[in-house]
Amino acid sequence: TDEIMQQEIRPLVAVDIIEQLHRQFAILSGGRGKDGAPIITFPEFAGFSEIPDDDFLNVVTYLTSIPSLEAASIGFIIIIDRRRDKWSAVKASLTRIAGAFPGNLQLVFVLRPSRFIQRAIADIGIKLYRDDFKMKVPIIMLNSVSDLHGYIDKSQLTRELGGTLEYGHSQWIHHRTAIENFAMTVKTTAQMLQTFGTDLAETELPNDVQCTEELLSSHTDHHSKLKDELKLAVKQGATLLTCIREPVTRSANSKLSPDELENVATVERLLAQLDETEKAFDQFWTKHHLKLEQCLQLRHFEHDFREVKLTLDNLMETQAGFADIGDSVTRVENLLKEQKHLEEKGQEPLEKAQSLALHGEQLIQNNHYAVDSIRPKCVELRRICDDFTNESKKKYDILGKSLELHKQLEKASQWCEAGIYLLASQAVDKCQSQEGAETALVEIEKFLVTAKEHQLSNPKEFYNQFDMILNPEIKANAQRIVQKLEDVQEMFDKRQVSLKKLAAKQTRPVQPVAPHPESSPKRASPKITRPAAQQNTSYHFQVRRRGPAAQNGNHALVHIINELIETERVYVEELQSIIEGYASEMDNPNLVHLIPSALQNKKEILFGNLPEIYDFHNRIFLKEIENCIENPELLARCFLKRKEDLQIYEKYCQNKPRSEALWRQCGDSIFFQECQRKLDHKLSLDAYLLKPVQRITKYQLLLKEMLKCSKNSEGTAELEEALATVLDIIKSVNDSMHQIAITGYEGDVSELGKLLMQGSFNVWTDHKKGHNKVKDLARFKPMQRHLFLYTKMLLFCKKREENTDGHEKTASYSFKNSLKMSTVGITENVKGDNKKFEIWYNGREEVYIIQASSVELKNTWISEIRKVLTGQLEACR
């Protein structure tokens, strides 16, 4: 139907009626009447009455369609040349024109038959039949062409009518055909460009370098071919313009007729249209070509990023494996060499990463379309470089400290050996005389002066200095050497007492026994006789020995439990000071006038459920963990037993953003300054309000340390379960912090079941029906979405970050879409990217392609979603 309609409304063109035009029974010479009316001439034509009606109507319709609307609206002048014909031919012509002329008529001139009888008949006939012709315009009968010149200027008439207007019918047909062909070329070219433009807009950008290069090459080739087509079309138009203007170019006296001038204007207009089409296409192509080039840059960048990231990850993994801090000077020196070698090995990958990050930033500066994809990668590269550099520096610092420590321990050990050797080398018989005793004393005093070189005279200061690297093994070694120093010092003290007695007064000979390193004398404690390598008074380790490894593990375990109990007591005291020194003071009548109006009746917002946390720790938890000091294995049970109670931290953390906002509003008030002064706190209240958040995190660190010391021993399983419990609480707290920031969701999130996972992803959507396919190039950019996975629903949100009064950004999650878990399915692998997976809805009517930041994260989410779907399946059974 559309094709038929298009055929019906398509205007006539010369090629459609070329044979009829060549018969020349009607012509549009290009002449004009005095008021600009176009002239159509019907020359003498023997078989005029035999011309089929369709042919006559087509020719006349075509001729009347050529002049401009402005000229046609004036009305056409018709000249009927019937000088050599009969009255019957005049009558037939007038009748046919009156019945079928499609244009607006102004005048009709008839050059009547020249023979006397026919002229007389014509005069009578026109009077008799004028009304029959049904023409509303004058019909002027003329005897000769000279009469015609009285109405129309000679310059507007052809030579056949006694005028000077140059007219060649074949050339006129040629020009008309050429103009119409050119118009069709312009239209076709524009359609080709439009089709190509649509194809470009609908093209999906590839995900790898090779496909992007092939697409860029293919599109560029197609573009070059179309540009060649454009050049040919422009050349065709220019040639046609030259042909139409040829008479004027050939002779300065020649002038173009109004119709020829209109032909020139038509061709010029078509050339201008072609030029505009080319400019619009070039503009679109420039944008598309830039997009493809940027896509290729992005694919190269992503490829290089994956390679560099893999190298850096391996480097970081190797570095993380360098946990050893050495147990001797030689070992530490070797570790330093290994660290230096690793740093040298990492130099090239780090330079590559920095160079790639710089390249990424240049892409961003050049307004690359994928800024949101490039910037996080640049940040990630710089972060890894910084992490490696910082970790290297940290390792150098630790190994430097370790080297210094072991050098001191080695010096101290050597000093002990030298001291024992000195005591053993003092001959017994020589010491019996006063002179010999005095000489021995001088040797001892000289030797004792060198004790300062080993700098271990103050063990407590020594431990403080090297606390950061004192692991159980090193600590045990240090304690052994400190004990050895004390033993050697004691030996010197006793020797000095004996020698001083000998030097002061000669009595009966004393037989001092030369000591041996293996049997040095020990000081006795009033309560405990200390065995070899006894405990150091700075650390109250009273653990039964079961061999070296067990001893070291138990020492560390007791140390961790001591630390846990000690920090728990401090924590409870700090909570008490906040409640009594701040919260209770808000009800103090003497301080009410200092409380800012923004804080009135907002105590619960500022402090949240802090009193509840204090009450739990003070009354229950502290007492329970204090009972574990003798039985470390009971500690894990405390955490398992109090799993539900520790959920109070979730409520506290959920309120934290409101508390912080309130603090920013009135934290600098005199009221808080006065409370801080009374408490003699060095830090302001906001630092203390962070303590609960820090405390819940501290538990998992201490439990991890305990697990390290309790590998393959009794109670390890319970410790692992306790750690998992605390980590689950931290995750639950963290998830709930994100959940409370969801905005725009009309339902109740508490009805969606348990929040299992949440995180940020790149998301593409593909709707099979009900949505028009987006053709804009911008759709290749993924949506940044934060997903919340509940047991009953999957929410899609958009993360928004806002600065709050110059403080750090606060995130909120604007709800965008949701999927019921009872109606979704998953496709675990998407071709071309191992970090992508699909979630589809209603039999793939809607498909969501989701890209995780890592393969591990993707697998974790797939595992959780699979559990939900499996659970639903089992529930249905």
Image (spheres, grey):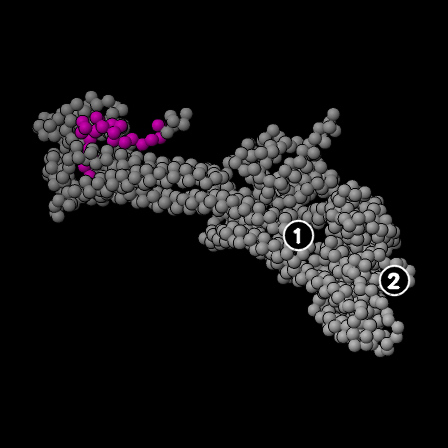
Residue lying furthest left in this view?
Answer: 116
* Displayed quadrant of residue 871: top right
Please tell me which residue is depicted at 14% across the width and 40% down the height of the picture: 165
Question: Where is residue 803 drawn, in percent x and y?
Answer: 62, 58
Please tell me which residue is depicted at 27% across the width and 37% down the height of the picture: 182
In this orientation, does residue 192 appear? Answer: yes
Residue nearest the viewer, comparing 327 with 100:
327
Please tell me which residue is depicted at 73% across the width and 54% down the height of the picture: 473
Q: On residue 324, which mark appears? A: 1
At mark 1, the secondary structure is loop
Give the residue at mark 2. 524
Q: Kindly identify the amino acid type of the residue bearing the numbered disc 2.
A: Ala
In this orientation, does residue 598 appear? Answer: no
Q: Quadrant of the N terminus?
A: top left
Total number of numbered discs in the rendering: 2
Up/down of 307 relative to 538, above or below: above
- Within the magenta stretch, is there residue 673? no
Question: What segment carries the magenta color?
Answer: 7-32
Q: Residues within 10 Å of mark 1 (few under 14, many from 20)?
A: few
- Within the magenta stretch, is there residue 10? yes
* Displayed quadrant of residue 278: top left
The residues bearing labels 2 and 1 have C-alpha atoms spaced at a distance of 37 Å
* Displayed quadrant of residue 70: top left
Left-right relation of 458 to 80:
right
Please tell me which residue is depicted at 36% across the width and 45% down the height of the picture: 282
Question: Where is residue 501 drawn, in percent x and y?
Answer: 85, 74
Q: Kindly identify the amino acid type of the residue bearing the numbered disc 1.
A: Asp
Q: Disc 2 or 1, which lies upstream in sequence?
A: 1
